[in-house]
Image (spheres, helix red, strand yellow):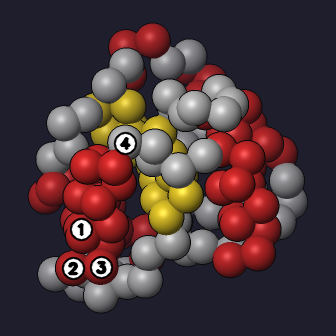
């Protein structure tokens, strides 16, 4: 699942995920993403922290608090990693700084969901 409100970044993330042979479920708003995560049970979530409808930190904390979603690896995608609390950084699979390094994301997909290049 790709949670990103910027269309260009969302499209890039989707392309990377699909190039790995995975199905991508996009969400442009945090509250919708929470509902979709419960319905879809994705293998991995990329999460932007700057969302239009709610703070991405709230989305992260709700995903981690819910027993149905707490074990889903989450990759934070942000342009503001230096402002992330250490507690958030230690509870996620990875933090990717924008602009996204395609190779790093591909490696993370392989590591966490077994996608192949």
> Label 3's element?
helix
- 73 relative to 23, above or below: above
Residue 63 image point, x, y percent: 74, 49
The reply, left or right, for residue 113 in relation to residue 88 is left
Which residue sits at x=34%, y=49%? 7
- 48 relative to 19, above or below: above
Residue 55 image point, x, y percent: 65, 27
Disc 1 crowd rating (10 Å Cα; few below 14, some 14-19, many 20+) is some
Viewer-nearest of discs 3 and 4: 4
Which quadrant of the rendered structure holds the C terminus?
A: bottom left
Q: Earlier in the sequence, mark 4 or mark 2?
A: 4
Q: Could you tell me if the residues under marks 3 and 2 are in contact, i.e. CB atoms within 8 Å?
A: yes
Residue pointed to by mark 2: 19
Question: Which label belongs to residue 16?
Answer: 1
Residue 22 image point, x, y percent: 37, 83
Q: Could you tell me if the residues under marks 1 and 3 are in contact, i.e. CB atoms within 8 Å?
A: yes
Q: Could you tell me if the residues under marks 2 and 1 are in contact, i.e. CB atoms within 8 Å?
A: yes
**Number of numbered discs on residues:** 4
Measure the alpha-carbon separation of dots 4 and 2: 20 Å
Which residue sits at x=43%, y=68%? 112
Measure the alpha-carbon separation of dots 3 and 4: 18 Å
Residue pointed to by mark 4: 6
Q: Could you tell me if the residues under marks 3 and 4 are in contact, i.e. CB atoms within 8 Å?
A: no
The reply, left or right, for residue 115 in relation to residue 2 is left
> Label 2's element?
helix
Q: Earlier in the sequence, mark 3 or mark 4?
A: 4
Residue pointed to by mark 3: 18
Q: Nearer the viewer, residue 82 or 30?
A: 30
């Amino acid at each position: 699942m790709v949670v990103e409100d910027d269309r260009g970044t969302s499209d890039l993330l989707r392309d990377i995920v699909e190039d790995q042979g995975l199905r991508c479920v996009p969400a442009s708003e945090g509250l919708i993403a929470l509902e979709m995560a419960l319905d879809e049970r994705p293998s991995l979530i990329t999460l932007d922290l700057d969302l239009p409808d709610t703070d991405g930190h709230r989305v992260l904390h709700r995903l981690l608090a819910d027993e149905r979603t707490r074990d889903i690896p989450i990759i934070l995608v942000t342009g503001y990693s230096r402002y992330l609390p250490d507690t958030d950084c230690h509870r996620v699979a990875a933090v990717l700084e924008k602009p996204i390094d395609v190779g790093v994301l591909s490696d993370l997909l392989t590591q966490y969901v077994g996608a192949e290049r």
